[in-house]
């Protein structure tokens, strides 16, 4: 393939034309350099402004998040739930309310109830007392929780959920056998009266039930 070769200008007219073209190219190149330099200068002027704007937006978002956390903390710290409110709840709302009450008591907690929960609806991890596993039983005001619930909690609290303390909580009542069996086997229970003292009157659950660090060693007594 033949290469294209440039012919030297011949004569005065061609030399003048070539010189004009060269000058035009040089002027165009200079203009491009000046334009590029102008854009670069503008970018250096705009960059600090962008950094300041982004910083202000970031600080604003951090303040909003901090305000939300503070307000949520204040709301939880002042949380009080009346028995009538519990009675009007469904199972899911009841579990979330118990979670919030544990958080109020200084025990980070989460709701885990649902299909296959293995007798645990709320799990809290108290910084001193260890893990508190809650089985929630929302029922009618006249409803009673029987011993079978205690058996189920006893069977899963330690081996499945690694509990230090297991608690069954209802807005109703417990049968005598259920309460007696729970007392013998270290399964705590909160009936309607205790629920009022905890949720409405503001007592802490661990104080209400007498939970302590020492009780963790013998947390679940074996059957006699």
Image: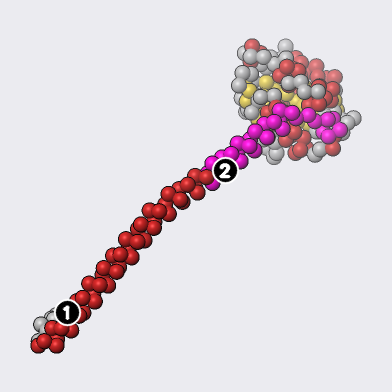
At a point 22% along the width and 72% down the height, the residue shown is 26
Residue 186 in sight here: no
Q: Is residue 30 above or below residue 70?
A: below
User: Horizontal placement of 33 versus 123: left or right?
Assistant: left
User: Horizontal placement of 187 versus 41: left or right?
Assistant: right
Of label 1 and label 2, which has the lower sequence position? 1
Residue 19's label in the rendered image is 1
Q: Where's residue 45, x and y in %?
A: 40, 53
Please state the extent of the stretch shown in magenta in the rendering. Answer: 57-86
Q: Where's residue 172, x and y in %?
A: 85, 28
Name the element at disc 1.
helix
Which residue is the site of mark 2?
61
User: Horizontal placement of 38 versus 202: left or right?
Assistant: left
Residue 147's label in the rendered image is none
Query: Viewer-proximal residue, 153 or 38?
Result: 38
Q: Where's residue 142, x and y in %?
A: 90, 30
Question: Residue 35 lies in what quarter of the image?
Answer: bottom left
Question: Residue 203 lies in what quarter of the image?
Answer: top right
At a point 73% along the width and 23% down the height, the residue shown is 167
């Amino acid at each position: 393939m033949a290469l294209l070769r440039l012919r030297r200008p011949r004569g005065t007219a061609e030399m003048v034309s070539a010189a004009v073209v060269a000058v035009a190219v040089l002027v165009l190149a200079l203009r491009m350099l000046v334009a590029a330099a102008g854009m670069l200068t503008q970018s250096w002027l705009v960059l600090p402004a962008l950094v300041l704007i982004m910083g202000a937006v970031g600080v604003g978002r951090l303040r909003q998040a901090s305000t939300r956390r503070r307000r949520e903390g204040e709301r939880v710290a002042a949380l009080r739930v009346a028995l009538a409110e519990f009675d009007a709840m469904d199972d899911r709302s009841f579990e979330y309310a118990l979670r919030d009450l544990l958080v109020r008591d200084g025990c980070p907690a989460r709701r885990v109830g649902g299909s296959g929960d293995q007798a645990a609806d709320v799990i809290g991890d108290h910084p001193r007392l260890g893990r508190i596993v809650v089985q929630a039983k929302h029922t009618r005001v006249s409803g009673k929780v029987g011993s079978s619930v205690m058996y189920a909690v006893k069977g899963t609290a330690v081996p499945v959920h690694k509990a230090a303390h297991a608690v069954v909580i209802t807005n109703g009542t417990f049968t005598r056998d259920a309460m007696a069996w729970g007392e013998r086997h270290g399964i705590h229970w909160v009936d309607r009266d205790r629920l009022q003292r905890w949720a409405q009157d503001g007592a802490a659950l661990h104080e209400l039930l007498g939970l302590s660090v020492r009780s963790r060693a013998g947390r679940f007594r074996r059957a006699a």
